[in-house]
Image: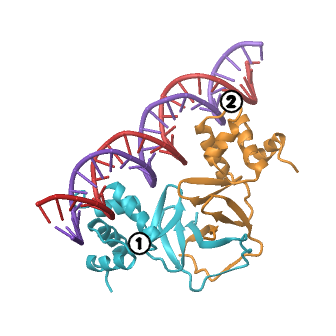
Chain colours: A cyan, B orange, C purple, D red
DNA sequence: TCCGGAAATTAGACAAAGTCCAGATTGGTG
DNA sequence: CACCAATCTGGACTTTGTCTAATTTCCGGA
C-alpha cells in the first residue's frame, strides 16, 4: 500500500483527525518518506513550490498528530525534536557526527532487570538510543 | 567524602581542568547536590547571592566539563539539556508531568539482542530512558 | 615588585526552535 | 445565502544557547 495523498485522508480520519489540505500535505511528507523529520524539515518540504503552510500550522499539526498517536516524538538532539511516522515498537540508532537517525526493530531486543515503578505510576514509553560515531 | 569547595579543586585538577573560582562554584553546584541540573539552574544557583558568573561562562564551563568527562549530558526534555554529575553506568527515569529525572543503576539491567553496528563505527553510549507518568 | 602574555571571564548582540495571539479564511449546515 | 465553528495565518515574542570583542586575572621571569 502506497502513501498517496488520497490515502492520507483516510489515515487521518481513522485517527479522528479532520483531514484538511495542510494536514494531508504534512502527513504525506512524513509517511511517504518514512523518515525522521524535524519541524523545520517538514516545513521546507511542504513549502517547496511556493509558501503554502505557515510555521504555526506545521507546529500545531505535528502536535496534533502526536496527541492522536499518528506519529512519535524522538528526542536525541538537544537542538530539535524529530517526528517519527513509525509508531510500532522500535529503538533508535543515532550517528552523532552526522545527525543521522535510523530505526532498530525492537523485535529481538530484550531489556530486563528494570526496577519496579514508583506506586501509582505507569510507563509511557521506553526510549533506547544507541549513539554511535565513526571510529577515530 | 564530602563535596567541599576545596575538594572540587582537586577533582578539577585530576580531570585536567584549571580550577578557577567560577569553575569551582559550578562543580560544587552539581556535585554537592548530586542532581541533574540544566544550565539555567546552574546559573541560578551560582548567582544566588549576587551575580558572579556570566551566562557565557556557565555554558563554556559545562561544555568543558563534558569534554573532560566530568559530567554527562542527558537529553530527555526537548527544551533543555540536563547535566549529570554521575558518570558511572546508569539509566534514567523521567516523570513527564513534573520533569523530574532520576537515576536507574545499570548494575542489574541487561540489554540484549542489539544488532551489530555498521562497519567502522563505535558506540559512544547507550541511553535508556523510561518515561513514566501518574496513572490517570 | 613590576611587566607581559596567555587563559579565562564578561556583557551583550545574535541565532534558532518553538509558542502565542488576534484576525482572516474555510467549510459545512440550515 | 448566512452563520458558526474549526482552522489557518503572519508576526511578535520567549527561551535556550552561541559568538565576539573587550576586559580581567593569573603566573613566571627580570
* x 67%, y 66%: residue: B93
Query: Residue A74: in sight, yes or no?
Result: yes
What chain does badge 2 belong to?
Answer: B
- x, y percent for residue A103: 50, 76
* x 45%, y 68%: residue: A66
Q: In the image, B108: left or right of D21?
A: right
Q: In the image, A102: left or right of B104?
A: left
What chain does badge 1 belong to?
Answer: A
- Numbered tag placed on residue A35 in the rendering: 1
The answer to which of B17 and B78 lies nearer the viewer is: B78
The answer to which of A50 and B99 lies nearer the viewer is: B99
The answer to which of B43 and A7 lies nearer the viewer is: A7
| C-alpha span from label 1 to label 2 | 48 Å
- The quadrant in which residue B26 appears is top right
Total number of numbered discs in the rendering: 2
- The quadrant in which residue B25 appears is top right
Label 2 sits on residue: B50
Mark 2 crowd level (few <14, some 14–19, many ≥20, 10 Å Cα):
few
- x, y percent for residue B113: 63, 83
* x 64%, y 41%: residue: B43
- x, y percent for residue B102: 70, 61
Amino acid at each position: 500500500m502506497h502513501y498517496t495523498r488520497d490515502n492520507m485522508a483516510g489515515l487521518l480520519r481513522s485517527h479522528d483527525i479532520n483531514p484538511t489540505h495542510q494536514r494531508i500535505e504534512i502527513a504525506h511528507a512524513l509517511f511517504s518518506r518514512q523518515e525522521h523529520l524535524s519541524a523545520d524539515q517538514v516545513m521546507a518540504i511542504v513549502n517547496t513550490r511556493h509558501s503554502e503552510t505557515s510555521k504555526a500550522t506545521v507546529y500545531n499539526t505535528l502536535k496534533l498528530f502526536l496527541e492522536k498517536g499518528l506519529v512519535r516524538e524522538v528526542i536525541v538532539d538537544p537542538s530539535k525534536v524529530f517526528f517519527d511516522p513509525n509508531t510500532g515498537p522500535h529503538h533508535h540508532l543515532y550517528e552523532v557526527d552526522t545527525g543521522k537517525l535510523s530505526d532498530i526493530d525492537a523485535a529481538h531486543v530484550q531489556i530486563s532487570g528494570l526496577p519496579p515503578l514508583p506506586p501509582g505510576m505507569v510507563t509511557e514509553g521506553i526510549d533506547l538510543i544507541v549513539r554511535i560515531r565513526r571510529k577515530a
